[in-house]
């Protein structure tokens, strides 16, 4: 099954003349269209808010587009808070869902008026001490423990480092109430790259049940429930995108029966997806440098796992298209590699592709989240440029490629300046 790309082979070659490969390119029109689809699925909830998980693609140009679409920022570090602020997300447009948090980051989050989502019961006192008091609104992250099955990337919740136990939540909200906190949120994140809509609906249902129980026992009501991120994307051509309208509908039904019918007042539904917001709409473009034929056939690219490490890290599948050879049958089997001195530096193993030659441009799909963002400089590899394909077809550089000067910038040594 083929996968579409938003540019022709000729256009891509033009771009590669101007911006040497490898580079990442993001499709603005597709990002906006999907953002609108997500919002439409939850339009039934007044106050629905998606906080884009900045870690997926921490580029302020993309964050600004998402802000225009009404999305906030989900941050978990100092740099991510600074980025959110730079694109104009302030106050409750920022969710700070961190763990093992340094005091300075709590202070920064408070300064920006971000919603602070605590990862542990001891963080109530830690935050109070760091900031000289508690904010009026606080959220807690729930780890449901053995209640849910977990999934391949995130593992089992009871083995995950995140969140409060169920018992600690009751204790924590009571403690926060006693300390004068007035508004409350409840959060969990138990999925990652999940494609089954029911899993997300079940997560929301569990949160609604828990919100009702806590509100009864502790004597508080919730402002919002945050179902986290974790909506997956169809990396493999035989997978199907999650039906987001169905997720919205399913959660709407659960909201009616598990929350409103139980007497809890209306609350806002929050979400902090990253992967599905930008992932399918970003592409890594790279050129074949060498083709070698030893015990296997290898196509060596000018990109490496420093530009996209998911295949090497998780054995993840990323689809590969050869735009100039769309009509050529995939008769050859290649390991598609990078140039790191690491044998796992492969984008694909045993992939059926058209016959390749040095100079061919390859497009690696679904690189719009956890692609450039996970980049690193091992082996002296430099991070690539990021480009934006605009709705009018023009292309804008939204991050330049690193240079050797950038790489050596933190060294003070003769001959390296
Ligand atoms: C990574 C992360 C997200 C986003 O997850 P996706 O799988 O990219 O949707 C949201 N919230 C928290 C706390 C995260 O760590």
Image: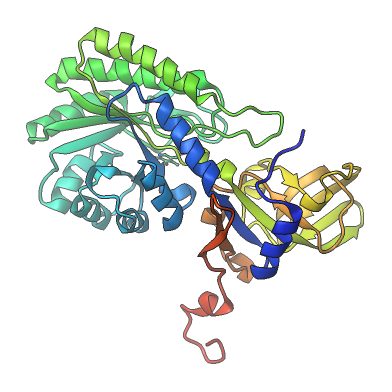
Q: Residue at x 10, y 47 (%)?
A: 133
Q: Nearer the viewer, residue 300 or 148?
A: 300
Quadrant housing residue 166: top left
Is residue 7 shown to the viewer in this render? yes
Q: Position of residue 388 (x, y in %)?
A: 54, 56
Please state which of residues 137 and 66 is positioned toward the viewer in this rendering.
Answer: 66
99 lies left or right of 37? left
Q: Residue at x 75, y 61 (%)?
A: 287
Classify residue 387 by image quadrant: bottom right
Quadrant where the N terminus sits is: top right
Quadrant containing ligand 1: top left
- List x then y, in percent, for residue 62: 45, 52
Q: Residue furthest bottom?
A: 414
Indicate left or right for 221 with 401 as reference: left
Residue 413 x, y percent position in the rendering: 51, 88
Q: Is residue 262 left or right of residue 357?
A: left
- Of residues 158 and 74, the one nearer the viewer is 74
- Above or below residue 407? Residue 249 is above
Count of marks placed on residues: 0
Q: Is residue 379 above or below residue 169?
A: below
């Amino acid at each position: 099954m083929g996968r579409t790309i938003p540019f022709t082979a000729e256009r891509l070659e033009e771009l590669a003349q101007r911006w040497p490969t490898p580079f990442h390119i993001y499709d603005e029109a597709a990002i906006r269209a999907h953002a609108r689809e997500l919002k439409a699925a939850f339009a039934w909830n007044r106050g629905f808010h998606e906080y884009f998980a900045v870690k997926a693609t921490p580029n302020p140009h993309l964050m600004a587009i998402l802000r225009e679409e009404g999305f906030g920022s989900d941050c978990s570090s100092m740099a991510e808070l600074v980025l959110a602020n730079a694109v104009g997300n302030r106050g409750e447009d920022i969710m700070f869902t961190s763990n093992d948090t340094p005091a300075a980051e709590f202070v920064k989050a408070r300064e920006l008026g971000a919603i602070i989502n605590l990862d542990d019961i001891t963080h109530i006192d830690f935050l109070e001490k760091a900031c000289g008091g508690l904010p009026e609104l606080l959220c807690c992250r729930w780890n449901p423990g053995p209640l849910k099955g977990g999934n391949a990337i995130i593992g089992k919740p009871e083995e995950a480092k995140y969140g409060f136990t169920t018992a600690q939540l009751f204790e924590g909200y009571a403690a926060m109430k006693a300390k004068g906190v007035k508004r409350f949120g409840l959060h969990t994140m138990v999925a990652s790259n999940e494609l089954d809509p029911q899993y997300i609906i079940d997560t929301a249902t569990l949160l609604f049940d828990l919100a009702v129980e806590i509100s009864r026992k502790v004597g508080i009501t919730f402002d919002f429930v945050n179902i986290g991120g974790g909506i997956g994307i169809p990396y493999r051509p035989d997978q199907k995108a999650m039906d987001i309208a169905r997720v919205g509908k399913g959660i709407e039904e659960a909201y009616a029966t598990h929350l409103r019918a139980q007497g809890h007042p209306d609350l806002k539904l929050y979400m902090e997806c990253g992967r599905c917001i930008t992932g399918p709409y970003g592409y890594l473009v790279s050129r074949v440098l060498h083709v070698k034929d030893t015990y296997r056939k290898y196509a060596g690219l000018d990109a490496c796992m420093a530009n996209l490490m998911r295949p090497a890290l998780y054995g993840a599948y990323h689809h590969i298209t050869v735009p100039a050879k769309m009509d050529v049958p995939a008769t050859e089997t290649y390991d598609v590699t990078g140039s790191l001195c690491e044998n796992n530096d492969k984008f694909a193993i045993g992939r059926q592709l058209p016959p390749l030659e040095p100079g061919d441009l390859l497009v690696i799909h679904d690189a719009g989240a956890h692609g450039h963002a996970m980049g690193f400089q091992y082996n002296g590899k430099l991070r690539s440029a990021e480009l934006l394909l605009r709705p009018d077809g023009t292309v804008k550089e939204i991050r330049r490629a690193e240079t050797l000067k950038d790489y050596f910038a933190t060294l003070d040594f003769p001959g390296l300046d």
